[in-house]
Amino acid sequence: MRVLITGIAGFLGSHLADALLEQSHSVVGVDNLSTGSLENLRHLEGESRFEFRELDICQPFDPGKVDYVFNFASPASPVDYNRLGVETLEVGSAGTKHSLEVAKRYGAKFLHASTSECYGDPKEHPQTESYWGNVNPIGPRSVYDEAKRFSEALVMAYHRYHGVDTRLVRIFNTYGPRLQKNDGRVISNFMVQALHGEDLTVYGEGDQTRSFCYVSDEIAGILALAWSDEHLPVNIGNPHEWTILDCAKAVLKVTGSKSRIVHRPLPEDDPMQRKPDISKAMSLLGWEPKVDLETGLRLSLDYFRSVEPA
Ligand code: UDP
């Protein structure tokens, strides 16, 4: 297959490219490099089945005939999407539409990278795909949450009205090598802080929870969904739930760091809890994550050692 990946220079886009090339597909990747980095694609230079085009999917574009479209373009960390608020709304609306148009034009299958943020600050725990969420439509996270929710509606509309063969994956917190070192996310912050002897910045008391999925597990789940016939959303994440304080302690243990834990103000609308119910992925795809947090942090050590703090 010839496969298109939007947002290919990002963390998940670049790992997805590796996995698809490994499965013998050809990959054409596009990115406007607003948050992605060519560093993530450097190892693919000279790969004849790989092609990169720098472009912004907020404008109509044509990558040539493709058989599958993976739509992964968007700022994704709270720091990035707050800096690029309007751009985040644009890529999650016009960008998704232009990617869907490519799939429609060539009769390609389509998979959209959605998010656990569709559930907002969830009142249902753990989150199943049938939960409609608790999202503040005008708060600081709304530029990301509503863009992703609009994208889901658009994807379902192209499926219903135009017959495009679509998939929606709701991705929960994912980590591993190639996470941007300065993107402000919790794992990248804690790992870089611990490895450089700086204080670990826990926001609030650290009793809010997240459930962290190692990147190889996430990609395996996304591809299992891609090759399935499911059109409705599927959660792909690791259901092991951690408080942020315990996550900080796990980072200190794995890195052997003597850094201190300090507390900083909790950002506005920071979700209190997040944990995927992955029953649907398990029964439908036969997928479940294999890598626990400490193992995944160990696998990420070399990468985070190689990056300089902000
Ligand atoms: N967080 C933290 N310290 C940091 C960065 C993040 O305590 O240096 C917290 C943040 O408040 C949130 C959780 O870690 O509760 C996850 O934040 P992240 O930005 O990684 O992603 P989110 O899941 O909120 O989109």
Image (tube, grey):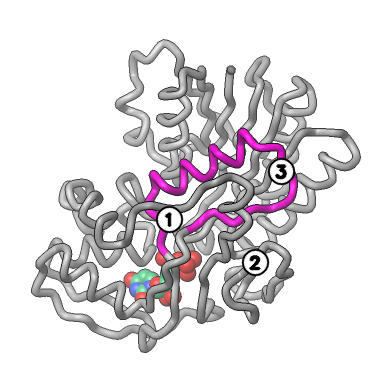
What is the x, y in percent for residue 275? 51, 70
The residue at which mark 2 appears reads as 128
What is the x, y in percent for residue 131? 71, 69
Q: Secondary structure at mark 2?
A: loop
- Describe residue 186's horizontal placement relative to residue 62 as left or right: left
Q: Residue at x 58, y 27 (%)?
A: 4
Check the picture and name the quadrant holding the C terminus.
Answer: bottom left
Q: Is residue 310 above or below residue 269?
A: above
State the residue in front, 70 or 225. Answer: 225
The residue at which mark 3 appears reads as 230
Q: Secondary structure at mark 1?
A: strand
Three-letter residue code for mark 2? Thr
- Describe residue 300's horizontal placement relative to residue 166 as left or right: left
Three-letter residue code for mark 1? Thr
The residue at which mark 1 appears reads as 174
Three-letter residue code for mark 3? Glu
Q: Which residues are magenta?
A: 212-237
Q: Secondary structure at mark 3?
A: loop
Whether label 1 lies within 8 Å of ligand 1 gets the answer no
In the image, which is nearer the foreground, mark 1 or mark 2? 2
Instruction: Tell which residue pokes out farthest to the right in this image.
Output: 161
Q: Are marks 2 and 3 in contact (CB under 8 Å)?
A: no
